Image: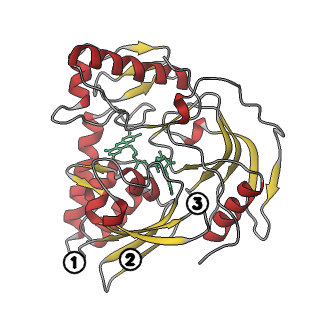
């Protein structure tokens, strides 16, 4: 299917590293606009902190949460007409958003929800906004094996497809058959797992302006639901007992570099418990940064840079953030 509009601009990932040349001035603080031919509202100046697991960050200049492909397409058309960049927001569980907020249109995908378990093929097709833990439980309760590892990852299906989320030896790429994406030129394309270029916590979708709208996973029906729910439950309990789930974070901040675990390296350079403002390296798991209640995005960003500098100085290794950093931050 091809629509008749030109691509909207999309905020460049990692544009956080640009100097702070200006402060965003978001006009029309209380405006809301109904998208043509839909019931979907675009609202201005919407706080984003409560939409991220770090609970930090400023407002979106404009925010929309489409609940259908038509509303998503209308959102794209609207952004294009206003020449606005677009940023996608799933469950916000792997995002650090600048205190200054995000210019342009933030598209929240959490309302893109539906799921269809095909008993003939053992495939499940789910909307991008479907919570990954919910999908894991649903599959286990049906006796469909494959997603037990996913239960403790607090993101959406779309976010998991983009990030190649994984845990307990499993990852999204292992079970994904294909993902449907809406491209900026209005084309809907189905990409196979091979085409998505998966590697450790990455895919070709990172750095592209394509929206994941739904994904299809191949599972194995016919297993014992009691056994699968017990395995799923064990995974969740293990994570709750080894990771600091009780405070706001983004999970692991850094990718593991080569043979080393990022958390181990951070511990070795003596940064466990190290704090900048309200952001602290977790005692329980050093690859987690916790918002102790009063953290700003700047605190967290500075702590990330400090960790990188110390690990680089003592180990000659560059830790790369797994967390996606969005908006403007002061370079350190
Ligand atoms: C307590 C905790 C534990 C965690 N444990 C794990 C773990 O074990 N393993 C793991 O891999 N991760 C883990 N994470 C990180 C996070 O949950 C995953 O990366 C998750 O896949 C992110 O999904 P999300 O919906 O929150 O995406 P977001 O954080 O909202 O977005 C992540 C990236 O994907 C893009 N994006 C999101 N949805 C779409 C879409 N529909 N179309 C296009 N782009 C999109 C965003 O623009 C952004 O670039 C953890 C996080 C927390 C807070």
The residue nearer to you, when weighing 137 against 253, is: 253
* Front: mark 1 or 2: 2
Asked if residue 193 can be seen in this view, the reply is no
How many numbered callouts? Answer: 3
**Residue 296 image point, x, y percent:** 55, 23
**Residue 136 image point, x, y percent:** 34, 60
Residue that badge 3 annotates? 111
Q: CA distance from mark 1 to mark 2?
A: 13 Å
Q: Quadrant of residue 289?
A: top left
Q: Residue furthest bottom?
A: 120
Q: Quadrant of residue 134?
A: bottom left
In terms of secondary structure, where does tag 3 sit?
loop
Q: Earlier in the sequence, mark 1 or mark 2?
A: 2
Q: Is residue 260 above or below residue 229?
A: above
Q: Earlier in the sequence, mark 1 or mark 3?
A: 3
Residue that badge 2 annotates? 117
Q: Mark 1 and mark 2 in contact? Answer it, CB < 8 Å.
A: no
Q: Mark 3 and mark 2 in contact? Answer it, CB < 8 Å.
A: no
Q: CA distance from mark 3 to mark 2?
A: 19 Å
Residue that badge 1 annotates? 222
Q: Mark 1 and mark 3 in contact? Answer it, CB < 8 Å.
A: no
Q: Dividing the image into 4 quarters, which one contains the N terminus?
A: bottom right
| Residue that appears at 22% across and 63% down | 228
Q: Earlier in the sequence, mark 3 or mark 2?
A: 3
**Residue 183 image point, x, y percent:** 55, 64
| Residue that appears at 36% across and 48% down | 153
Question: Is ligand 1 within 8 Å of the beta carbon of the residue shown at mark 1?
Answer: no
Position of residue 57 in the picture relative to residue 227 (left or right): right
**Residue 182 image point, x, y percent:** 55, 65
In terms of secondary structure, where does tag 1 sit?
loop
Q: CA distance from mark 1 to mark 3?
A: 30 Å
């Amino acid at each position: 299917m091809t629509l008749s509009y030109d691509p909207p601009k999309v905020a460049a990932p990692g544009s956080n590293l640009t100097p702070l040349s200006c402060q965003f001035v978001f006009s029309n603080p209380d405006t809301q606009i109904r998208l043509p031919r839909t019931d979907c509202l675009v609202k201005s100046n919407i706080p984003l902190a409560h939409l991220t697991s770090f609970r930090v960050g400023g407002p979106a200049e404009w925010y929309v949460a489409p609940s259908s492909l038509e509303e998503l397409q209308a959102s794209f058309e609207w952004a294009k007409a206003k020449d606005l960049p677009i940023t996608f927001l799933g469950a916000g569980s792997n995002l650090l958003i600048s205190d200054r907020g995000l210019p342009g249109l933030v598209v929240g995908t959490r309302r893109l929800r539906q799921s269809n378990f095909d008993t003939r093929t053992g495939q499940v097709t789910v909307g991008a906004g479907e919570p990954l833990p919910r999908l894991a439980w649903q599959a286990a309760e049906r006796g469909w094996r494959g997603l037990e590892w996913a239960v403790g990852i607090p993101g959406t299906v779309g976010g998991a497809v983009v990030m190649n989320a994984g845990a307990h030896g499993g990852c999204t790429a292992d079970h994904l058959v294909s993902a449907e994406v809406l491209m900026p030129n209005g084309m809907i394309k189905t990409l196979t797992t091979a085409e998505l270029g998966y590697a450790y916590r990455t895919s070709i979708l990172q750095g592209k302006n394509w929206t994941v709208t739904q994904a299809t996973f191949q599972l194995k029906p016919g297993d014992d639901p009691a056994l699968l729910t017990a395995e799923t439950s064990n995974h969740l309990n293990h994570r709750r007992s080894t990771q600091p789930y009780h405070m706001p974070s983004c999970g692991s901040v850094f990718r593991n570099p080569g043979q080393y675990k990022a958390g181990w390296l951070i511990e070795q350079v003596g940064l466990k418990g190290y704090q900048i403002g309200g952001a602290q390296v977790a005692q329980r798991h050093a690859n987690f940064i916790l918002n102790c209640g009063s953290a700003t995005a700047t605190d967290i960003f500075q702590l990330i840079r400090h960790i990188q500098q110390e690990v680089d100085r003592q180990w000659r290794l560059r830790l790369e953030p797994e967390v996606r950093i969005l908006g403007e931050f002061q370079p350190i």
